[in-house]
């Protein structure tokens, strides 16, 4: 009786040292079920659901006896999650032109400054080439047609470049209009947090209909084919209110056993945040539906893999020469903000981080068993190492030396740290409320997690020297 009890207990507690790995599909899907449950409301940074996820990760780290990386597991940082332009403080006025309605006649670019400008309007027909040498734009509004090469009218990236240039040349504010050739529907930009640093001056978009109304008032003599300065000034007030929240990365450290090499680090990371309830401005691909975006694959899958791999590494830490930092990033969906904050506030010298391994969307292994990775060529022998480590894994590895992109490992790459980003590929539920746990390939993610465990284990014990290799 007693004998059987001992057997039973030891098999429950057994970890890989005893032949039983904690990396099991059952454990992984349990974590995904929780992280991607409606209770966590899409894990939007600063939300209650995100906080529940953060606590869940910390409990798992603690249970696996993983030391906190900081004085506790949390690294806090601020994130702008929402931009708002309250109606009374935002307006356009020109004598005799009537009223202009925000988000109907005009809209405000996310990188606009909050400012009040009363100035004449300089209208240029042929965009950048003209205003490069034209001193007339100084202290005037500059009115430009948006770039015709612009593929996505709702995006504001190339608008930023043009606006910044006009500002640097002295423009008091910038007005952009969609030419018909660019966007026949004349969609106005949305005010949502973006990565660009805001300019100090207002940058607004005017609808073509509003421009037709304003043009005869500002330029009574001119047609679309003439450049010039308006006869009366235009008054614009822009006031943008930011909603900022505190977000947190959750990080622990598994100390290596080699007295010298344990001062070198391998980082294993995955973001745990997602899009919350979605809606415009969140990155949802179904923005007109306000519903919980559970993010089972993106990225409860990577987070759950992180938890089991971290536990397994911790159980076997005596076998590790280098130390391993395990980290769950927040605010990835807002532009890799958590990982960027981490690399800007590293608790160890950047040069001691040898490779960063990132998991983002690893739960949907396809029928061909393809696991994709980019950045394998950012350290010497990386491509071979990633391939060799996968022999016998049952995975079909698609290894790219370059193609570094898409997720938090990019923040490391930009700091000159070698990195590999892994994923099982896109799917129709990407960034939609339907990215649910029942679509996860459970045996698949177990295989993927075991492979990534072997990768991190191999990197922590590797004898070849590391150095950063830049890729395209
Ligand atoms: Zn993601």
Image (cartoon, rainbow, N blue to C red):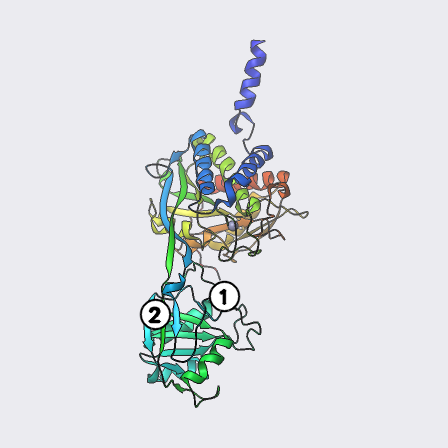
Residue in front for this viewpoint, 55 or 12: 55
- Residues packed near mark 2 inside 10 Å, few (<14), some (14 to 19) or many (20 plus): many
Q: Quadrant of the N terminus?
A: top right
Along the line of sight, the residue nearer the viewer: 306 or 385:
306
Label 1, on which residue?
A: 155
Q: Quick one: SS at disc 1?
A: loop
- Of circles 2 and 1, the one toward us is 2
Residue 379: percent from left, percent from top? 46, 52
Residue at x-position 56% and y-position 44%? 296
Which residue does the numbered mark 2 point to in the structure image? 201
Q: Nearer the viewer, residue 233 or 294?
A: 233
Residue visible at 57% across and 37% down in the picture? 33
Helix, strand or loop for disc 2: loop
Q: Is mark 1 within 8 Å of ligand 1?
A: no
457 relative to 264 in the view: left or right: right
Seen as rendered, the residue at the extreme top is: 1
* Rendered position, 414 above or below 25: below
Percent coordinates x, y for residue 79 in the rendering: 39, 52
- Mark 1 neighbour density, 10 Å: few (under 14) some (14–19) many (20 or more): some
* Vertical relation: 64 (above or below) 466: above
Alpha carbon distance from label 2 to label 1: 19 Å
Q: Earlier in the sequence, mark 2 or mark 1?
A: 1
One can see residue 453 in this view: no
Instruction: Check the image and report above or below for 151 versus 52.
Output: below
């Amino acid at each position: 009786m007693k004998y059987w009890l001992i057997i039973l207990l030891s098999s429950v507690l057994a970890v890989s040292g005893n032949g039983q790995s904690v990396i099991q599909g059952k454990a992984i899907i349990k974590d995904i079920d929780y992280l991607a449950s409606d209770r966590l409301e899409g894990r939007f940074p600063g939300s209650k659901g995100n906080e529940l996820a953060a606590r869940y990760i910390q409990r798992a780290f603690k249970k696996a006896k993983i030391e906190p990386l900081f004085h506790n597991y949390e690294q806090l940082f601020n994130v702008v999650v929402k931009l708002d332009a309250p109606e009374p403080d935002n307006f356009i006025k020109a004598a005799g032109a009537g009223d202009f309605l925000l988000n109907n006649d005009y809209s405000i670019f996310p990188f606009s400054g909050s400012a009040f400008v009363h100035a004449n309007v300089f209208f240029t027909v042929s965009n950048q080439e003209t205003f490069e040498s034209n001193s007339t734009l100084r202290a005037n509004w500059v009115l430009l047609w948006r770039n015709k090469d612009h593929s996505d009218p709702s995006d504001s990236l190339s608008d930023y470049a043009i606006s910044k240039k006009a500002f640097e040349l002295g423009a008091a504010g910038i007005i952009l209009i969609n030419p018909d050739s660019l966007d026949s529907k004349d969609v106005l930009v949305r005010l949502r947090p973006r990565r660009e640093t805001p300019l100090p001056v207002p940058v607004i978009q005017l609808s073509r209909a509003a421009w037709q109304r304003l043009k005869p008032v500002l330029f009574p003599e001119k047609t679309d084919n003439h450049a010039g300065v308006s006869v009366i000034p235009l008054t614009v007030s822009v006031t943008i209110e930011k909603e900022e929240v505190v977000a947190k990365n959750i990080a622990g450290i598994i100390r290596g056993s080699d007295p010298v090499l344990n001062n070198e680090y391998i980082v294993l990371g995955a973001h745990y945040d997602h899009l919350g309830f979605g809606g415009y401005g969140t990155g949802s691909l179904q923005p007109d539906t306000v519903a919980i975006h559970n993010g089972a694959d993106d990225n409860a899958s990577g987070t759950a893999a992180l938890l089991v791999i971290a536990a397994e590494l911790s159980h076997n830490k005596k076998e590790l020469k280098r130390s391993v930092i395990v980290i769950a990033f927040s605010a990835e969906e807002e532009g890799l903000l958590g990982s960027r904050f981490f690399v800007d506030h590293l608790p160890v010298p950047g040069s001691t981080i040898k490779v960063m391994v990132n998991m983002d969307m690893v739960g949907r292994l396809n029928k061909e068993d393809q696991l994709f990775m980019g950045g394998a060529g950012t350290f010497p022998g990386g491509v071979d190492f990633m391939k060799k480590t996968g022999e016998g894994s049952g995975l079909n590895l698609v290894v790219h030396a370059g193609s570094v992109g898409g997720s938090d490992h990019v923040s490391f790459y930009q700091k000159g740290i070698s990195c590999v980003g892994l994923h099982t590929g896109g799917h129709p539920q990407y960034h939609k409320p339907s990215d649910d746990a029942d679509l996860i390939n459970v045996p698949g993610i177990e295989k993927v997690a075991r492979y990534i465990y072997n990768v991190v284990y191999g990197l922590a014990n590797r004898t070849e020297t590391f150095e950063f290799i830049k890729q395209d």
